[in-house]
Amino acid sequence: MIDRAIIKLPGMKKMLGLLAGLAVLQAIFIIGQAYTIASAITGLWEGGRLQEQVKWIIAFLIVYAGRHIVTFLRDLLLDDYAYEQACDLRNQLLQKIFRMGPQVVQQEGTGNMTTMALDGINQVENYIHLILAKIMNMMIIPWLILIVVFLLDWQSGIVLLIVFPIIIIFMIVLGYAAQSKADKQYHAFQVLSNHFIDSLRGIDTLKLFGLSKGYGKSIFHTSERFRKATMSTLKIAILSTFALDFFTTLSVAVVAVLLGLRLINGAILLFPALTVLILAPEYFLPIRDFSSDYHATLDGKNAMTAVNAVLTHPEKEVVQKDLRLWNNESQLTINQLTFHYEDQPALSSLSFSVNGYKKIGIIGMSGSGKSTLINILSGFLHPDEGDIQLDETVDSFAQHSWQKQLIYIPQNPYVFQLSLKENVAFYHPEATIQEIEQAIEVAGLSELVKELPEGMETQLGEGARTLSGGQAQRIALARAFLDHSRKILLLDEPTAHLDIETEVELKERMLPLMEERLVFFATHRLHWMKEMDYILVMEKGQLVEQGTLEELQAKNGAFVRLSQQMRGRADG
């Protein structure tokens, strides 16, 4: 039931020691409760006055308060610990995603990664809190109570000792059934997350081609599978809870009947019989608490397994080099670079060289390998073969000293659920108001600021003010304008989803950003090539032609054919 990864969490040994101490203390208070209340009732039964039992009543109130104070302190301790570990896991997960980039997101699914980083980590936090408290209580409290029961009445102790393992075995059988159902439920949840997010991101395209209703039905069927999987899991959870309550209640009833018969026969005194009867439900309480939250712990365990699967995803070890900052004298040379997606070739024998501050256009049809090349240059993907000279020889672009010099602008930049000002300054929170205003003006966001009800302080993102694709791209440009230190700019078809009027307007804003930088601009829009110093022509994962615009036009080769093909499609 406990994920092995929990035992490896930082500070776990100290936490288990504290929980064990609190569990022992709680067991003492539980026994104290039974002892004091039984003493008071026995005193009254034997004809004592109520005033004589005040000391037992006060003692009962003290141990009762002590028990709940221990519970409060335990929950407070676990709240802090679980929150701290959940934050650490979320940071590890995000760092892993940032290091591996699109590769791990494509493998796991965008929706799955999103829900894992948000809801999944929250489930892990709840899991850590619940499982540690429940397991520790179940390991310690029943056995301390059982020792006291044996000291008071060995016959009742034998009954409780025999029943407990039977209940445990029964719960293990039901637990395996619940685990199987929970695994299917979590898998259905992953499918639903990926399917929903992918459909939502492509809703404009689906509506354009009249496919939105079909995908709506597909999402409905997927959500129905998830609903059925959830209900099936809940049936097992409810059955296990009912069975456990039934058997524990039956066991307490058996103990009560046996004690009653022996009391009538005078074989046992009232005080030990009453104390045992009060302790019997407490003996089963830890396992009942564990069962009541079993489904929640299963969800958390599955989420933690999924998070650890990503965290332990193999990464290629890259020898880090201390590379110099890119300047006008720097040079990059790539020879015979090759990359495969599993068994499918994506790039084959790429060779080119660039130096200094230049604008490099990467053009080709969809699927030609443009984005793959950008992802390799960013260090998100590692080439299978090839020689990379970057001041010195490196195995991959996943060099910290290289990546710290990059600015990356994708097709769909993310707008955070923050104000416009905070979105622009997200990567540079130390930026002044004057610098942010200048970046907003240069990126062409001044009109948007005037339209917003609270200006730069207006909240954007999910559940707040929505933006068009062009406005989101302008925010990405404004972020880049704020960073004057990074001299390498990677753009992966940043205008692919914009209309031509918006693109032309954005182009005027983007060109100044490219000055005094090394720029790799992947696109399938021909008009950008006039602004490029050098052009790489991609076709089916191969670099079929390279040179300046004039050189490529003079060759009348692959670039000209590609231009004619693109213009033909545009005319069509």
Image: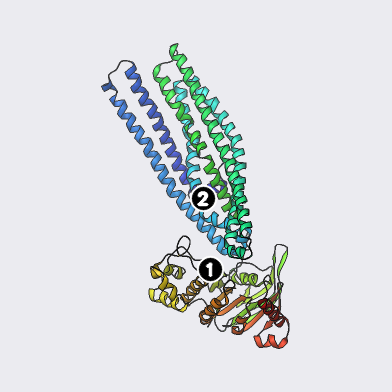
Could you say which quadrant of the image residue 377 lies in?
Answer: bottom right
Task: Name the residue at 56% across, 53% down.
Answer: 307
Residue 291 visible in the current orientation: yes
* Most foreground residue, 401 or 494: 494
Residue 511 vs residue 370: left or right? left
Q: Are marks 1 and 2 in contact (CB under 8 Å)?
A: no
Number of marks drawn: 2
Disc 1 target residue: 413
Q: Secondary structure at mark 2?
A: loop
- Using the image, determine if residue 114 lies above or below residue 553: above
Q: CA distance from mark 1 to mark 2?
A: 34 Å
Residue 331 visible in the current orientation: no
- Using the image, determine if residue 62 lies above or below residue 323: above
Could you say which quadrant of the image residue 39 lies in?
Answer: top left
Task: Name the residue at 53% across, 56% down.
Answer: 117
Query: Pointer 1: residues within 10 angstroms few (<14), some, or many (20+)?
Result: some
- Rendering coords of residue 123 (x, y %): 51, 49
Query: Which dot marks residue 193?
Result: none
Query: Which dot marks residue 9?
Result: 2
- Rendering coords of residue 385 (x, y %): 70, 70
- Using the image, determine if residue 11 lies above or below residue 343: above
Q: Secondary structure at mark 1?
A: loop
- Using the image, determine if residue 317 lies above or below residue 292: below
In the rendered structure, which amino acid carries the disc numbered 1?
Pro
In the rendered structure, which amino acid carries the disc numbered 2?
Leu
Q: Earlier in the sequence, mark 1 or mark 2?
A: 2
- Rendering coords of residue 183 (x, y %): 61, 45
